């Protein structure tokens, strides 16, 4: 597979997708063009990846099979106005713009073949979780292209109802921040009881990595895995009791609900 891909904008996630596409051989350097208004950013991308760059979005999308919208939400209206009527029916638009709904994209671009994706930060190291949905005009072959691009960044899940994108935003999209906060808190607690900070960080990092991999490979329910580590009357049981008294599970639920409500409002579906 050697797709011609245009990246409109960049940022960390757009660059992660560009790197994944190149690493997996989904597109050659000669088949990729990146558009960015920032000259320094264009020069950096060109030097780092050896791909063509331009400051013209219209030039970038010319002849592309896939057009990746990786711009900031506040720039979307201007980009849609610039590209309105410029896309061919065969071209696929893949948007990773937070909050931008399919209806908004299709109308603004005057184009039907649009896919909306919610990736997450670990995609930058090939360990991402991407949840995506597609407009009705996206062909089966185009869906295969999307699956291959997102699969190059980690795991991908297709959903047939756009409402699940907002839910994914609150769980896998924002989820790394929840994990980082927990890790940060665990490091601080370890330092508080006397561990050197560098040792505490290494212990927490490996514990989280190992626990996640173990959970993934075991296939057992998370509650069962938790009970495996918890001896009655032991140290783990004492620690979990304190978390339960602080309503740890309830706070996590409240956080996810708040993120979901915010995602819906940003996309225009909230009250």
Image: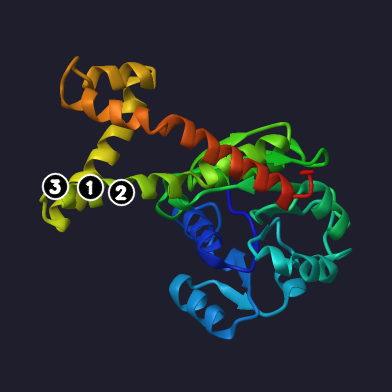
- Side of 180 relative to 96 (left or right): left
Say if mark 2 contacts mark 1, CB within 8 Å.
yes
- Label 2 or label 3, whichever comes before in sequence order: 2
Front-most of residues 167 and 66: 167
Q: Please name whichever residue, 107 or 28, is drawn nearer the observer in this view of the structure.
A: 107
Residue 169 image point, x, y percent: 59, 44
* Residue at 72%, 78% in the rendered image: 56
Per the image, the residue denoted by label 3 is 193
List x then y, in percent, for residue 237: 23, 23
- Can you tell which quarter of the image residue 170 is in? top right
The residue positioned 33% from the left and 25% from the top of the image is: 217
In the rendered image, which quarter is residue 147 located in?
top right
Q: Residue shown at 16%/27% (left/top)?
A: 235
Give percent across and percent down for residue 220.
36, 17
- Which residue, given by chain and number where applicable, does mark 1 sit on? 189
Give the Cα separation between the discs numbered 2 and 1: 6 Å
Nearer to the camera, 182 or 53: 182
2 or 3: mark nearer the eye: 3
Residue 122: assigned label? none
Q: Secondary structure at mark 1?
A: helix
Which residue is identified by label 2? 185
Q: Is residue 248 left or right of residue 54?
A: left
Label 2: which secondary element: helix
Residue in the picture at 28% in, 17% down: 227
Classify the position of the C terminus by image quarter: top right
Of 222 and 243, nearer the camera is: 243
Q: Percent x, y for residue 36?
A: 63, 75
């Amino acid at each position: 597979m050697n797709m011609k891909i245009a990246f409109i904008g960049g940022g960390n996630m757009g660059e992660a997708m560009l790197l994944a596409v190149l690493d997996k051989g989904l597109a050659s350097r000669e088949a990729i063009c990146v558009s960015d208004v920032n000259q320094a950013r264009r020069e950096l991308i060109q030097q780092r990846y050896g791909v063509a760059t331009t400051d013209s979005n219209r030039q970038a999308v010319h002849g592309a099979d896939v057009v990746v919208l990786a711009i900031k939400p506040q720039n979307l209206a201007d980009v849609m106005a610039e590209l309105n009527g410029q896309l061919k029916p065969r071209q696929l638009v893949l948007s990773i713009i937070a909050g931008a709904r399919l209806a908004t994209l299709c109308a603004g671009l005057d184009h039907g073949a649009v896919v909306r994706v919610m990736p997450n930060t670990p995609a930058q190291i090939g360990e991402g979780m991407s949840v995506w949905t597609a407009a009705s005009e996206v062909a089966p072959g185009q869906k295969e292209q999307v699956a291959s691009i997102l699969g190059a960044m980690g795991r991908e899940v297709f959903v047939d109802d756009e409402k699940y994108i907002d839910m994914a935003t609150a769980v896998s999209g924002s989820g790394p921040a929840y994990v980082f906060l927990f890790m940060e808190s665990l490091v601080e607690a370890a330092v508080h009881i006397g561990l050197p900070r560098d040792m505490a960080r290494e212990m927490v990092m490996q514990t989280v990595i190992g626990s996640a991999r173990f959970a993934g490979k075991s296939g057992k329910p998370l509650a069962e895995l938790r009970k495996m580590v918890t001896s009655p009357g032991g140290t783990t049981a004492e620690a979990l009791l304190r978390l339960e008294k602080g309503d740890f599970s309830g706070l996590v639920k409240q956080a996810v609900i708040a993120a979901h409500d915010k995602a819906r409002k940003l996309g225009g579906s909230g009250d």
